[in-house]
Amino acid sequence: MLKIQIFIGIVGVVFSLTTLELLRRRLLRPRYALVWAGMSAVTFFVALFPRLVAMAAELTGMTYTSAVITLIFAFGALMLMNYSVIVSRQSNRIIRLTQEVAVLREQLERHVAASRPRE
Amino acid sequence: MDEAPSTPATRLLVVIPAWNEAASIGSVVAAVRRELPEAVTLVVNDGSTDDTSAEARRAGARVMDLPDNLGIGGAVQAGYLYAVREGFEVVARIDGDGQHPPSEILKVLAPVLEGRADLAIGSRFLEAGDYRPSRARRAGIRLFAWLLSRICGQRLTDTTSGFRVSGRLATAHMADRLPCDYPEVESLISLRLAGYTLFEVPVEMADRAEGISSIGWTRAVYYVLKVLLAVAVDLCAKPHGSREEMARRFASESKKASEDASC
């Protein structure tokens, strides 16, 4: 077994354990954990069959380090963009929720104030 | 409900967004109630940390306390949402700092009440008034006026004015779709592209009664760039629902309501 295999294997273990622990503490929702579980799976796969990576590199012509780094960077950027979309959507929802709560509170206050003297 | 939304007394809602305006909000509310005794005044307290809410209540306004600070766009939109929920037919929006004299509201109301416009904007620049902005501010105002006039296909002079009156359809559009970042400029584009009619009315505006609004060159340039970006996005973005759709929605809702009433 190559040193690099062991190293990648450890990275995979840390990845999957972190994901599981976050899930267990309910800090991570299962739907968002999927992509991290996928990452762990890929990492393990690479650790177990290092020749597959070489084959993939051969097939796609990505034999340069810079190409690999670009790929990793693109993946990271895509992930971040995905989270920006999620954050924007959630911010819109929070704003609407805040407004709805305020509308309801005003209506309720007025309702209570109006019904009080009649009791 | 203490007042039925359909009575004439509740047809006009004056929305005043306020964030830490305790010093001026009381007199603004009092002035609105004096000028428009038949209107309902709603102060949208945008998470103030001072006595804005209490001062507004003391002056006799309805107060909607937002649980958190949403910024001007979110606060104004909350007011529009309230108007839709409570069935108000016309909404006037003025600032809480005393910049928009309530005595001028009637002027801005006229085009909407007469059915000539979906949204009327109180403009400081349509006629020579006393308002003298700083040079940085004036440059930005000119740029937006030129750009928005081109986009909207009509002459607009005061695109950042928050002094506005909207009819039911435009109010509902903004309750759904008011962009939260730069609501004054962007809402004009959003409304115009959706087929709503805009109309500017010359008004006198006072200097800010309290508080500070000092925009220097760097902040002015930064603000202009941010708004330009938002405008560019608005022009490319998926269009919002059209005025026709909104009119149909209102027509079917009122038809349904009358059917319900007849049952």
Image: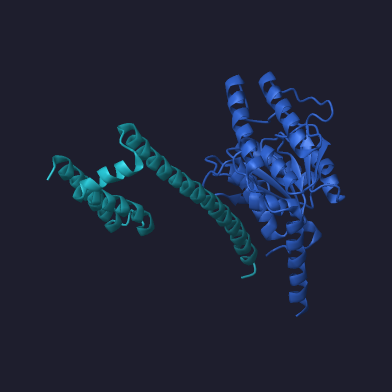
User: Considering depth in this image, is B260 or A52 the residue closer to the camera?
Assistant: A52
- Residue B179 occupies quadrant: top right
Which residue shows up at 38% across the image and 41% down it? A76
The chain drawn in cyan is: A
Image location (x, y in percent) of residue A94: 51, 51
Task: Choose top left, top right, bottom left or bottom right for residue A109.
Answer: bottom right
Chain shaded blue: B
Camera sees residue B55: no
Residue B195 percent across, percent down from the top left: 77, 49
Numbered label tally: 0
- Which quarter of the rendered picture does the N terminus of chain A lie within? top left
Can residue B158 be seen from the camera position used here?
yes
Left or right of residue B65: residue B157: right
Q: Residue at x 23, y 52 (%)?
A: A17
Residue furthest to the left: A1
The picture places residue A111, in percent across and down from the top left corner, at 62, 63
Instruction: Write the residue at 63% across / 28% down.
Output: B224
* Camera-nearest residue between A104 and B58: A104
Which of A102 and B35 lies nearest the eye of the viewer? Answer: A102
Rendered-image quadrant of the C terminus of chain A: bottom right
B225 relative to A63 in the view: left or right: right
Q: Residue at x 34, y 55 (%)?
A: A33
